[in-house]
Amino acid sequence: MAGADRFRPLRCLHLRRGFTLIEILVVLAIMGLILSLVALEYGGLPGREDPGDVWTARLRAARDQAMRTGRIFTLSPPQGGDAVYFYPDGASSGGVILLPGERLVVDPVTGLSARYPQP
């Protein structure tokens, strides 16, 4: 009988392979919680971008494109108004872009924008 006890642990290990459904569900729930916290911390939810951030990035990209290509690049505001022209030297025509709750003022000398709350 002493020889039979030696092989018993091996048979028990053979019976339990893989993970149970409950273990997999617990791991998936924990991973989902961690991923949702990371998404909220580092990028927010898709489709919830701040309009001021979006238009600041568009203005910066338009200025960069004008400087890179050596041509005048035009960007029109969303609610109408005057378009902002960016020149190859980095300057712009200047202007104000009105957004809900704030306004972006484009500096004519540097072509950079600044955000201000709506009065």
Image (cartoon, rainbow, N blue to C red):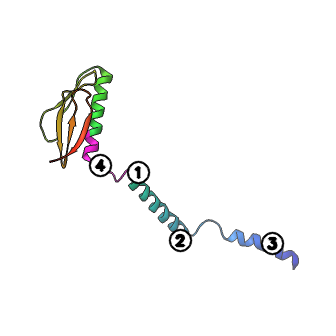
**Viewer-proximal residue, 115 or 52?**
115
Q: Which mark is residue 22?
A: 2
- Tags 1 and 2 touching, CB below 8 Å: no
Circle 3 packing at 10 Å, graded few (<14), some (14-19), many (20+), is few
Question: Residue, x 16% and y 32% (percent of image)?
Answer: 83
Decide which of tag 3 and tag 4 comes sooner along the chain. Answer: 3
Q: In the image, which is nearer the foreground, mark 1 or mark 2?
A: 1
Structural distance between the alpha carbons of marks 3 and 2: 29 Å
Which residue has dot 3 on it?
7
Dot 4 crowding, Cα within 10 Å, few <14, some 14–19, many 20+:
few
Residue 24 versus residue 105 in the image, above or below: below
Q: Which residue is mark 1?
A: 42
Q: Residue at x 18, y 48 (%)?
A: 100
Q: CA distance from mark 1 to mark 2?
A: 30 Å
Magenta-highlighted residues = 43-55
C-alpha separation, residue under disc 4 versus residue under disc 1: 12 Å
**Mark 4 lies on residue:** 49
Amino acid at pointer 3: Phe
Please report contact status of discs 2 and 4: CB closer than 8 Å, yes or no.
Answer: no
